[in-house]
Image (cartoon, rainbow, N blue to C red):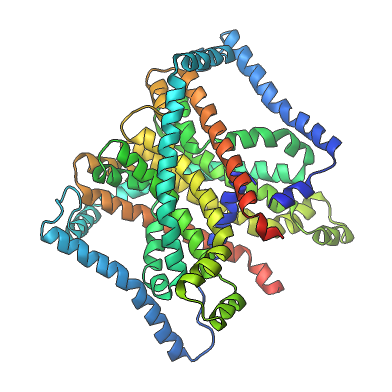
């Protein structure tokens, strides 16, 4: 098992690990159960927040080490009101979308051709695996020397991060299409094109989409790394800047933004995934 | 997983042919590369010939610098990984075994997990200074998260019938932990450790880039970039891939060895 496979397996497990829905019972019972779950989930962060704000109010920790949570909130409001947070977030999002679309398209094309043709797979797989073996971060100095530190660097690194899981999963998804699905196509005398668009692609959607989701998660991770290293705008830059000014409130605000955006990116792909897989729900 | 890959392999002869086919593309690439740099089609600074890279590797090796860099990275990496997993396994077990912790701390952990790991670097560099401690703390954090996630999942899914047997036998808490929870969570724990191994290797490179330059493969590559020594950078890329691959192989071997009882 290569590390890429392992990585993917763990990611699939994480995606599949939806919280248990309260089963049966009346609506009221489920409601109190839900409220209780939420309340339990809030206890720990509330306690943490209390200790944190107590510690900074009593000057137990200097603000350069851990700023008062209220200061973080004020900074957040300020950055939100001036539109500065939106500005940096937009730049980061735009970069991720550029890199991700490039990487995912290349990954889809490569994955489909590797999945459909034995020959392409034999030719391309070793080289692909060699490239995949070095983490995106490892390519940064090399790409920097080749294209400089501008947008191209960010897009290339993010695209590389997104491409790997998309390719692997697309190839795997297509190869694992059940044989009897294809046989149905043969019976219906589908040509190559119809078999591909009506049978192979829809049937491989779940696996492919896991790859796409994972690709986007990877792309977001790579964005943060590359922005920390070489950037003059974006959320990663905001962190570096806050760190240099010893204004940890800015750093923490940017971290929260990174977490939230990362979560929503994955969440929205999850919605699209469910929509694309609606045929399966009907079928079972 | 390993079983699947071996059974899906085709007969020996076809496999060797497949191996040869796989070498065509890299060979063509290397030929084009070598030709381009030999005939000066591309700036030699951008695309050093293979001889230059090999020469650089030999030089670095002979001067003993390469060994120092690799050793520095590996020591840092293993220390961080050891700390991260030593904290992660108990944390994951606690989350998986105690319903209260699962409900109170679990959601917070899952929320914090959403923050891309590199986003912690600025904060960690403030909290732990700019030296070795900060790097190790960051590597430990990168290992900690997957170890917790998988240990947690493993400990939570103790088979119900076994849990009932434990109840009938009125095992103490400690006995239930060591005889039931840990053995049944072991495969998941290993997946977590394996992932932790991969993530902390990534984090080692990241820490060496982002924090102060010191000996290490990341340092070597940064230096190569700053002085425009492409050969040094390519050497670093090869080292990163090679060491990552080697560690991964080692982990797989250990994993199958330790978990062999499970197959019987």
Residue B239 or residue A19, whichever sits in front: B239
Q: Position of residue A94 (x, y in %)?
A: 42, 46
Is residue A38 depicted above or below B134 in this figure? below
Q: Residue at x 70, y 59 (%)?
A: B263
Q: Residue at x 66, y 17 (%)?
A: B31
Number of marks? 0
Evaluate whether residue A213 shows in this view.
no
Is residue B81 depicted above or below B161 in this figure? above
Q: Position of residue A137 (x, y in %)?
A: 46, 36
Q: Which quarter of the image is occupied by the C terminus of chain A?
A: bottom right
Q: Position of residue A199 (x, y in %)?
A: 76, 58
Is A58 placed left or right of B164 in the picture?
Answer: left
Determine which quarter of the picture holds residue A225: top left
Q: Position of residue A170 (x, y in %)?
A: 66, 49
Q: Residue at x 38, y 81 (%)?
A: A36
Is A90 placed left or right of B11 in the picture?
Answer: left
Is residue A14 depicted above or below A34 in this figure? above
Evaluate whether residue A33 shows in this view.
yes
Determine which quarter of the picture holds residue A50: bottom left
Is B68 placed left or right of B178 in the picture?
Answer: left
Q: Residue furthest top?
A: B39
Residue B200 or residue A218, whichever sits in front: B200
């Amino acid at each position: 098992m290569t590390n890429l496979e392992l990585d993917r397996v763990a990611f699939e497990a994480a995606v599949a690990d939806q919280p248990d829905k309260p089963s049966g019972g009346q609506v009221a019972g489920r409601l109190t159960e839900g409220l209780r779950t939420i309340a339990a989930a809030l206890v720990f962060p509330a306690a943490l927040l209390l200790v944190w704000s107590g510690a900074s109010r009593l000057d137990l920790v200097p603000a350069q080490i851990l700023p008062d949570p209220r200061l973080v909130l004020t900074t957040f409001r300020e950055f939100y009101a001036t539109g500065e947070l939106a500005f940096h977030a937009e730049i980061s999002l735009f970069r991720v979308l550029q890199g991700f679309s490039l990487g995912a398209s290349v990954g889809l094309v490569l994955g489909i051709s590797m999945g459909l043709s034995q020959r392409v797979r034999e030719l391309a797989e070793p080289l692909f695996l060699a490239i995949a073996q070095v983490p995106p971060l490892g390519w940064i100095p090399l790409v920097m020397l080749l294209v400089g530190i501008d947008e191209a660097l960010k897009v290339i690194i993010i695209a590389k991060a997104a491409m790997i899981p998309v390719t692997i999963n697309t190839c795997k998804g297509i190869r694992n299409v059940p044989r009897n699905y294809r046989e149905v196509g043969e019976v219906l005398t589908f040509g190559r094109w119809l078999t591909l668009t009506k049978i192979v692609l829809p049937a491989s959607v779940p696996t492919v989409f896991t790859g796409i989701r994972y690709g986007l998660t990877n792309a977001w991770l790579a964005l943060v790394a590359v922005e920390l290293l070489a950037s003059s705008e974006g959320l990663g830059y905001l962190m570096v800047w806050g760190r240099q000014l010893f204004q940890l409130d800015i750093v923490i605000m940017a971290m929260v933004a990174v977490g939230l955006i990362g979560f929503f990116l994955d969440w929205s792909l999850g919605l699209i995934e469910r929509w694309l897989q609606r045929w399966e729900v009907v079928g079972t | 997983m390993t079983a699947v890959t071996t059974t899906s392999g085709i007969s020996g002869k076809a496999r060797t042919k497949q191996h040869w086919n796989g070498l065509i593309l890299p060979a063509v690439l290397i030929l084009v590369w070598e030709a381009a740099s030999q005939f000066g089609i591309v700036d030699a600074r951008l695309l050093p010939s293979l001889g230059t890279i090999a020469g650089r590797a030999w030089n670095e090796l002979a001067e003993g610098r390469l060994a120092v860099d690799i050793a520095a990275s590996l020591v840092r990496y293993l220390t961080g990984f050891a700390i991260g997993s030593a904290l992660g396994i108990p944390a994951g077990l606690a989350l998986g075994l105690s319903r209260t912790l699962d409900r109170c701390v679990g959601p917070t952990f899952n929320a914090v997990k959403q923050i891309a790991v590199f986003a912690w670097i600025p904060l960690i560099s403030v909290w732990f200074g700019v030296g070795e401690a900060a790097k190790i703390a960051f590597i430990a954090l990168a290992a900690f998260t997957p170890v917790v996630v998988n240990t947690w999942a493993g400990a939570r899914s103790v088979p119900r019938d076994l849990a009932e047997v434990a109840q009938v036998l009125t095992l103490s808490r400690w006995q239930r932990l060591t005889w039931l929870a840990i053995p049944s969570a072991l495969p998941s724990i290993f997946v977590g450790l394996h992932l932790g191994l991969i993530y902390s290797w990534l984090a080692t490179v990241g820490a060496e880039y982002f924090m102060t330059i010191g000996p290490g493969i990341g340092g070597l590559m940064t230096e190569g970039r700053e002085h425009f020594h492409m050969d040094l950078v390519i050497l670093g890329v090869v080292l990163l891939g090679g060491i990552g691959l080697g560690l991964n192989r080692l982990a797989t071997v250990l994993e199958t060895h330790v978990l062999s009882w499970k197959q019987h």
